[in-house]
Amino acid sequence: MTCNALRAGIVALASFLNLALATPALAQSGASATVTLAPYALEDMDELDGVTPWLTWENGMTGPMQASSSAGIWGSASDAYDTRRFHFILSPHTTVYLVALADLATFGPGPRASAEMMSRLAGADFGSQDEAWVWEGDSGQRRLSNVLTNEGATALQGWVDIVATSNTWGAAVPAVPEPATSVMLLGGAALLMVAGRRRRY
């Protein structure tokens, strides 16, 4: 191998190595959100009406009452969304304290996980709302709460929505060469070393 050919090989290898290490790679990101209704509490607003406070879930709800979403792919944006509505009937002169537990988790650059709970009684102009969220790298459980009061003398229908949202956005980070790339680089270096030795001898 001539000196010019050896020099050209070294330049080509250096260019390839520089390109492989300089090209940004998209980092893995992920997020998940699960919102679960917890046991509620009732308060009697008129102890003289002879009515024991009660709340009944419609449609015979059994099992976990929750919404869940997860998002996470390699190197591109992803969004996941889940919402559930549960209907109930609330006794007269009663306040209900609704609670939901939100398990939120994120990892990698860019993701967000959020939870929301909204509730309202039939005929009411306003309801109750609470939300929580975590950003990239943060995780934990958050407590959501809603308070509704039936001030009337008759039972009222109502509903509660729980919403779980997770989304991710890819972010460029310094790339780590794949195993195959590393093998190719080492192989090229070995060939150049052999060529150099043959030239000397």
Image: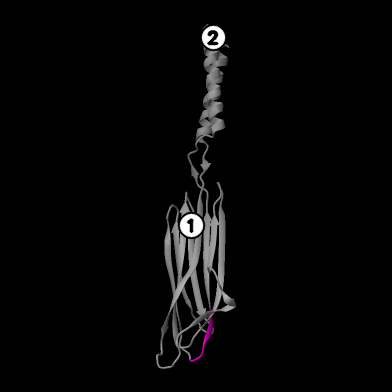
Residue at the (52%, 63%) spot, across then down: 164
* Residue at disc 2, secondary structure: helix
Q: Is residue 189 magenta?
A: no
Label 1 and label 2: CA atoms lie apart by: 59 Å
Residue 33 place in picture, x, y as percent: 50, 60
Name which of mark 1 and mark 2 comes first in the sequence.
1
Q: Find disc 1 in the rendering and name its residue.
A: 112
Residues packed near mark 2 inside 10 Å, few (<14), some (14 to 19) or many (20 plus): few
* Residue at disc 1, secondary structure: strand
Outermost residue to the top: 201
* Residue in front for this viewpoint, 63 or 132: 63
- In the picture, which quadrant includes the N terminus? top right
| Viewer-nearest of discs 1 and 2 | 1
> Looking at the picture, does residue 51 appear above or below residue 76?
below
The disc at residue 169 is none
The disc at residue 199 is 2
Residue 173 place in picture, x, y as percent: 48, 42
What amino acid is at disc 1? Arg
**Figure colour scheme:** one colour
Residue at the (46%, 56%) spot, across then down: 105
Residue at the (54%, 69%) spot, across then down: 63
Specify whether residue 169 is in view. yes
> Looking at the picture, does residue 169 appear above or below residue 103?
above
> Looking at the picture, does residue 45 appear above or below residue 14?
below
> Looking at the picture, does residue 35 appear above or below residue 181?
below
